[in-house]
Amino acid sequence: MAIEMNFEGTFEVDATSEKVFKAVMDPNEISSCIPGFKSLNVISPEEYSVVVRVGLAFIKGDFNIKFKVVERDENRHAKLTGNGQGMGGTLDLDAIMDLSEASGKTKMDWKADAKVGGRLGSMGQRLIGGQAQKLIKELFENLQKKLSS
């Protein structure tokens, strides 16, 4: 059983679009913003994998996710795909960001479509969606701190 989820939002920060783009697209920078981050393996400038510790209800474990940059328009737009597995589940992810800058602030419009399968997919969209929203919020809070320093 697989669950499909869609997330989208806007993120604004006091930084140039160049600084935001660089932070999001640099695996070393963005990986440290991921909640539960454990390790990073840079495969190429366009591919990297991370191991993250995930907790969902009473289940906790590591998830291995491989990311690939499939579209890149410097300082303006990017699309990444992610495929992962762990904890008896699978994840397929498409994430898009579009940046616009005005008066020294950058606005990021983002969208992510995820498909969760396996044992995790059988846990239900409400439980998984709620946890995903929490992790997304934490990711952007961490990114905000990184870009503000």
Image (tube, rainbow, N blue to C red):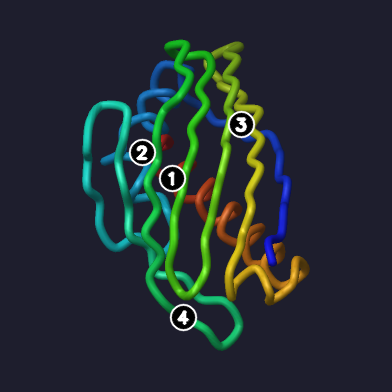
Mark 4 or mark 1: which is in front? 4
- Marks 2 and 3 close (CB-CB < 8 Å): no
- The residue where tag 4 is placed is 60
Mark 4 or mark 3: which is in front? 4
For disc 4, the neighbor class at 10 Å (few under 14, some 14 to 19, many from 20) is few
- Marks 4 and 3 close (CB-CB < 8 Å): no
- The residue where tag 2 is placed is 149
* Residue positioned most to the bottom: 58
- Which mark is on residue 63? none
Q: How far apart are labels 2 and 1 at the CA level?
A: 6 Å
Amino acid type, callout 3: Glu
Residue 67 x, y percent position in the rendering: 40, 41
- Marks 1 and 3 close (CB-CB < 8 Å): no
Q: How far apart are labels 2 and 3 at the CA level?
A: 15 Å
- The residue where tag 3 is placed is 12
Q: Secondary structure at mark 2?
A: loop
Query: Which numbered disc, 4 or 3, marks the residue that appears first in the sequence?
Result: 3
Figure quadrant of the N terminus: bottom right
Figure quadrant of the C terminus: top left
Amino acid type, callout 4: Lys
- The residue where tag 1 is placed is 145
Q: How far apart are labels 1 and 3 at the CA level?
A: 12 Å
Q: Secondary structure at mark 1?
A: helix
- Marks 2 and 1 close (CB-CB < 8 Å): yes
Q: How far apart are labels 4 and 3 at the CA level?
A: 32 Å
